[in-house]
């Protein structure tokens, strides 16, 4: 029988894989295709679809307050557990929504408000967890481990998505959504148990003022540059991400099962690619990895979405799933690790808090703008081409993000062209004739 290692660091790394897997199932079953389908069932308008996709980012603005509180306590574990479990348990209310005496016109708004509150608590937990794991996992293997962890939990989440898609297509509404949401909460509670098994190193009580939680990261010129990149990137991401799944469901006419298979292809590809990206980042730095990932996310991904919708050829959409893994397999761990590389250990929670606050606000702003554009674009381009116009605009912004990475300093970072050359020579199989 599989058992946890005795060494506290290795035990934490072991339990983090289990906790991440359960939490990923919860996240997949309360976001993405499930939440999109639930909101469409409730009759949500484009502006409400944009809101429900973007309010989790606005909720990240609570992160600096969580960092300050944890600093004064000197501990992170109990506060992380409290906020994570409470925030995820709130989704029981969404599952029971069809039973409540709430006017139908207000139900999408109720879900938006619930998502905002739940996300605020989870954002606080996420900020504390990031700084906590930064203290536990050795720096020399952090990139490889986090790449493997992200890929593994992605595959577990993919299997959960397949089950969710199967249930959503075969059970009548709203019972299908209710069952999936309740099972997701159950997985979240199990993840809380695994989180409780994590080791917490001895922490210092940091008696800095609440204002210092905001001021300390902003005094750092290099970190301010990174914040500028991250803010721009989140606007570019959220400008279209809330309408990708609605596009697949409404325009491409995917079933929930087919959409779950699409996410499965992306997750399997991510499982294979993320450890490789982590190894590349450990050797060449996170900055060039981030530059490559953001460029792919702004070019190949939206191009394949549009070609798939225009031609009806699903091959383009399967290719988009692979490019999704290529891009986010690079972006996700690199964004996280670049904050770690740019922050001192003692005040790391405040750096993560400021990063989450700014990216949360700008991501929410991008989502609000996307909702307004999708109310306006159909009047100009028609319903289908309104999506294409949004994808092109967001794609141009995403593909240009690497420019803002150039002035950021990272000790181990190499030039992007050198990393591309290394990838071409060592990671991409080339057959010689």
Image (cartoon, rainbow, N blue to C red):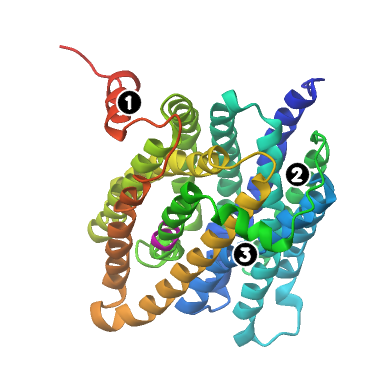
Prevalent SS, magenta region:
helix
Pick the front one: 189 or 311: 189
Local crowd size for mark 2, using a 10 Å CA cut-off: few (<14), some (14–19), many (≥20): many
Q: Quadrant of the N terminus?
A: top right
Where residue 157 sits in the image (x, y, percent)?
Answer: 59, 44
Instruction: Identify residue for label 1.
Output: 423
Where residue 174 sits in the image (x, y, percent)?
Answer: 65, 69
Q: Quadrant of the C terminus?
A: top left
Q: Is residue 182 visible?
A: no
Q: Earlier in the sequence, mark 3 or mark 2?
A: 3
Q: Is residue 80 left or right of residue 103?
A: right
Q: Is residue 426 left or right of residue 21?
A: left
Local crowd size for mark 3, using a 10 Å CA cut-off: few (<14), some (14–19), many (≥20): many
Instruction: Identify residue for label 3.
Output: 61
Residue 236 part of the magenta-drawn span: yes
Q: Earlier in the sequence, mark 3 or mark 1?
A: 3
Instruction: Report how far apart the C-alphas of labels 3 and 1 lie in the structure.
Output: 37 Å
Instruction: Identify residue for label 2.
Output: 191
**Where 15 sits versus 204, above or below?**
above
Q: Secondary structure at mark 1?
A: helix
Residue 92 part of the magenta-drawn span: no
Instruction: Report how far apart the C-alphas of labels 1 and 2 lie in the structure.
Output: 36 Å
Q: Is residue 13 visible?
A: yes
Tell me where the magenta segment starts and ends, as one range.
233-237
Q: Is residue 376 left or right of residue 106?
A: left
Instruction: Report how far apart the C-alphas of labels 3 and 2 lie in the structure.
Output: 24 Å
Where residue 203 sits in the image (x, y, percent)?
Answer: 80, 39
């Amino acid at each position: 029988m599989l058992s946890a290692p005795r060494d506290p660091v290795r035990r934490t790394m072991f339990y983090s894989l289990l906790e991440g897997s359960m939490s990923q199932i919860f996240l997949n079953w309360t976001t993405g295709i499930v939440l999109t389908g639930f909101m469409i069932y409730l009759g949500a308008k484009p502006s409400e679809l944009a809101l429900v996709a973007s309010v989790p980012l606005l909720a990240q603005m609570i992160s600096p307050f969580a960092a300050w509180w944890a600093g004064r306590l000197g501990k992170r574990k109990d506060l992380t557990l409290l906020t994570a479990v409470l925030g995820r348990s709130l989704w029981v209310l969404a599952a029971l929504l069809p039973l409540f005496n709430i006017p139908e016109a207000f139900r999408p708004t109720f879900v938006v408000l619930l998502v905002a509150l739940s996300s605020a608590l989870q954002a606080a937990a996420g900020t504390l967890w990031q700084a906590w794991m930064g203290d536990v996992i050795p720096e020399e293997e952090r990139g490889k481990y986090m790449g493997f962890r992200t890929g593994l939990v992605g595959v577990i989440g993919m299997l959960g998505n397949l089950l969710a898609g199967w249930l959503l297509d075969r059970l009548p509404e709203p019972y299908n959504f209710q069952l999936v949401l309740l099972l997701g909460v159950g997985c979240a509670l199990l993840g809380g148990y695994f989180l409780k098994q994590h080791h917490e190193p001895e922490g210092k009580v940091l008696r800095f003022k609440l204002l210092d939680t905001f001021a300390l990261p902003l005094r750092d010129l290099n970190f301010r540059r990174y914040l500028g990149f991250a803010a721009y990137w989140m606007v570019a991401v959220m400008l279209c991400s809330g309408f990708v799944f609605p596009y697949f469901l409404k325009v491409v006419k995917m079933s929930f099962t087919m959409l779950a298979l699409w996410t499965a292809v992306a997750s399997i590809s991510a499982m294979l690619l993320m450890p490789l990206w982590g190894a590349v980042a450990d050797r060449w730095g996170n900055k060039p990895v981030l530059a490559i990932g953001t460029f792919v996310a702004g070019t190949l991904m939206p191009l394949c979405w549009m070609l798939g919708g225009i031609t009806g050829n699903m091959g383009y959409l399967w290719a988009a799933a692979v490019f999704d893994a290529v891009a986010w397999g690079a972006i996700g761990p690199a964004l996280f690790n670049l904050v770690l590389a740019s922050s001192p250990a003692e005040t790391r929670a405040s750096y993560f808090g400021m990063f989450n606050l700014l990216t949360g606000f700008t991501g929410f702003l991008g989502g609000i703008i996307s909702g307004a554009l999708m109310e306006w674009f159909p009047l100009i381009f028609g319903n289908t081409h309104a999506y294409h116009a949004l994808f092109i605009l967001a794609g141009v912004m995403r593909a240009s993000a690497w420019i803002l990475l150039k002035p950021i300093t990272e000790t181990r970072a190499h030039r992007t062209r050198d990393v591309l050359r290394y990838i071409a020579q060592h990671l991409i199989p080339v057959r010689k004739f």
